[in-house]
Image (cartoon, helix red, strand yellow):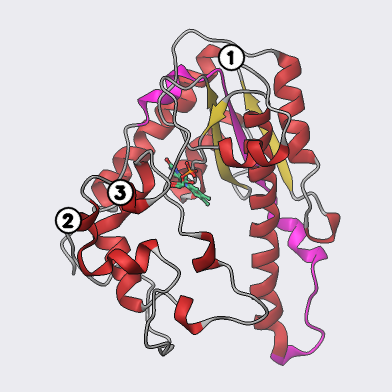
Amino acid sequence: MKKINNFIEVIKKRRSVRKFEKGKTISIESLKRIVDCGRWAPSGANTQCFDFVVINEKNMINKTTKVFLNQAQRLVDFAKGFPAVSKNYLANTVAIIIVIGDPRWKVCFPHASTKMFEKEYNDNNEAIFLCSLGAAIQNIQLGVTAEGLTSAWLSGSGEEKTNSDLSKLLGYPNWMKAYGTIPIGYPAKTQNKRYRRPLEQCLHWNKYEPKQYRTHSQVDFYESALRPFAMYRDEEQIENWPDFKEKLGIWANAFSSQICNKNEKLERKQNFSKPRTEGRSTRRRKLQ
Ligand SMILES: Cc1cc2nc3c(=O)[nH]c(=O)nc-3n(C[C@H](O)[C@H](O)[C@H](O)COP(=O)(O)O)c2cc1C
């Protein structure tokens, strides 16, 4: 694979790929350069609250694959409706990088010295911790792309059962958590594009534009009908989908133009802690 040196090109070429060529290898030097990208990520109070386990031995790759096959089966059994993909492809990785978060370092973030603000600061410390891990995971993904390879971003290792399986396999304390798993490989086919909202829809100048506000119904529609296509199709502009009109229906403009909220009214907060509607893509899920 050819290395990529142009920064913007690296950003745009980074793609979640879930099918790799068999029988490939990667050099230790390449893996070290990739992990070094994670090391240089920003972190709250420079705590560097992450560790990186690189799995590059075949038998360890196979054991890790097994953990994720179980994780994927749990999704099928207990999180019905989510568009899960078989994780057999992990067996064809050249390496898997596990990013572990160490929660003790949250003590170094700002803590309330006044009781009534404890929750506020604790909540933000959680955000600082997770964002630091996200920055490290993203840096590693970009490093993989710059090396001319591809990866994905698996979050299932953050589930308690899967984290416990991984901690037993890899030996880290089970009170730490593997927030990110990054399978690395040679893509079995070119996957360069992915749906993105138009720039003018998510870009707000100087203040939040109510006409660019995505309504509650649009979130429900994405979750229940559009999600699997937006996640996996190899196309940036949704209006280029051959079945654009059929898939989008009344939401065609909202998902393909600047304006998703013509009347410019913002809505009151509602509970989005779990799926609220059943649509074409989530029929298998029975809402209870
Ligand atoms: C926090 C986070 C968690 C994710 N978890 C998973 C996952 O568990 N499995 C997976 O296949 N992709 C996962 N993804 C990848 C997203 O599905 C993907 O980034 C998105 O569909 C856009 O595609 P792209 O990465 O090719 O641009 C995750 C991405 C992020 C940022």
Farthest residue, direction right: 46
At label 2, the amino acid type is Glu
Q: Which residues are magenta?
A: 87-116
Q: Amino acid at mark 1?
A: Glu
Dots 2 and 1: beta carbons under 8 Å?
no
Q: Earlier in the sequence, mark 3 or mark 2?
A: 3
Instruction: Evaluate whether residue 132 shows in this view.
Output: yes
Residue at horizontal 48%, vertical 7%? 23
Residue placed under numbered mark 3 in the picture: 228
The residue identified by callout 1 is 57
Of 61 and 87, the residue lying toward us = 87
Q: Earlier in the sequence, mark 1 or mark 3?
A: 1
Which one is in front in this view, the residue at disc 2 or the one at disc 1? 2
| Magenta-drawn stretch contains 94 | yes
Q: Residue at x 49, y 83 (%)?
A: 210
Q: Secondary structure at mark 2?
A: helix
